[in-house]
Image (spheres, rainbow, N blue to C red):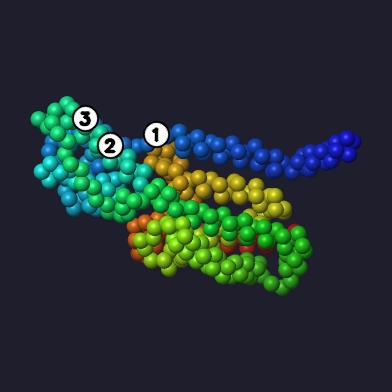
Amino acid sequence: MRNTWAQAKRIWQQFSHDPRTVVMFIVAPVLILWLFSAMLGTTPSEPRLAVVGLPSQVTTALADIAQVSVLSQADADAKLASRDIEAIVSMDGMTLNVEVEGTNASTTARTLAAIQSGLKTMAASGQGGVGALPTLDVSYLHGSADWTSFDYLGPVFIGIFIFVFVFITAGMSLVTERTGGTMERLLVSPIKNWQIVAGYCLGFGVVTVVQAGIVLMASIKLIGFPNEGNLGLVIVTTFSMAMVSMTLGLLVSGLARTAFQVIQLMILLVIPQVLLSGIFDLTNAPTWMNVLSVCFPISHGAEALRAVMLRGEGLADIGYQLAILWAFVIAFFLLASLSFRSRRTR
């Protein structure tokens, strides 16, 4: 019993000498739970519909259950393509034509359910002399009725898994080399700081290309994720996300002293990015949360993957997101080089 007590006392002393660990034990769970409460505490927004040439009584019925804009066909098509609305509603005789954006199956189902609810209410009340429900004809701008919510989340999961696994691999490898004494020998050699970081990026970069290719092929061929775009462009996007993760991992491992501290910093720097990457609908989330998600690289990578895999968009359409990802790569690379420099001067 005395030996057990002595061992426990030694663990407590280690915590008392490492206040950062104590703070992380408290801050990290509270931060993650707070983010969850902010995201999951919101109610789904009303569907956004564009109506083209509908009778006034139908427009009024839909306005009771959705955000309705009366637009021309050209303006409605543009807004649907830019995802500013969920559906375009028009009418041909007793057929109600509904064209949905289609990539998010849950949003599509909620939109169609709202339209049917509005029509039922209109028919039941006999507004405008209408006593029968119009026939619903649904068409899809992207995807199909067979797509599920998991198909919509698939590109995000691919980006997240690659980001997280590369971060852990890069961060832990560097800490392991430091523990084994390899890093100290490098730091006292004539090699420059940026050359050390560049060497890691080149080495891990080649491995990452292979990993991205295998993960993507397995996701598409075995799991069945849809891919409407160019597979090479998907690989470029995942590689860009992996490079961001790698340079961030090198930066974190340059600041951390132990593998445990790498995990602590991962919880603080990576988990919030994962939560705000697009897994959850942030439409009704607080404004600051939407702004914060735009500041994270995973969000831009996930949106680029969705654009290519779900909507078949090309390089011109995701060039902005790729530019942001590589801006993060450059920034993290420079900061990682500076962290090595600070260690060398100690």
x and y percentages locating residue 268 in the rendered image: 59, 46
* Three-letter amino acid code at the position of disc 2: Ala
Of the image marks 3 and 2, the number of the one nearer the N terminus: 2
Above or below residue 320? Residue 2 is above
Q: Quadrant of the C terminus?
A: bottom right
- Residue 145 is left or right of residue 232, and the answer is left
Kindly indicate whether the residue at mark 1 contacts the one at mark 2 (C-beta within 8 angstroms).
Answer: no
Q: Residue at x 25, y 38 (%)?
A: 115
* Three-letter amino acid code at the position of disc 1: Thr
Mark in the foreground, 2 or 1: 2
Q: Residue at x 74, y 43 (%)?
A: 18
* Residue 322 lies in quadrant: bottom left
x and y percentages locating residue 224 in the rendered image: 43, 57
Q: Secondary structure at mark 3?
A: helix
Q: Residue at x 26, y 46 (%)?
A: 87
Q: Residue at x 60, y 46 (%)?
A: 267
Query: What residue would you read off at disc 3?
Result: 121
Of the image marks 1 and 3, the number of the one nearer the N terminus: 1
Per the model, the C-alpha gap separating discs 3 and 2 is: 11 Å
- Residue 287 is left or right of residue 160, and the answer is left
* Three-letter amino acid code at the position of disc 3: Thr
Viewer-proximal residue among 92 and 272: 92
Viewer-proximal residue among 199 and 144: 144
Quick check: can you spot residue 88?
A: no
Q: Residues within 10 Å of mark 3 (few under 14, many from 20)?
A: some
* Residue 323 lies in quadrant: bottom left
Q: Secondary structure at mark 2?
A: helix
Query: What residue would you read off at disc 2?
Result: 114
Per the model, the C-alpha gap separating discs 2 and 1 is: 15 Å
x and y percentages locating residue 182 in the rendered image: 75, 66
> Which label sits on residue 43?
1
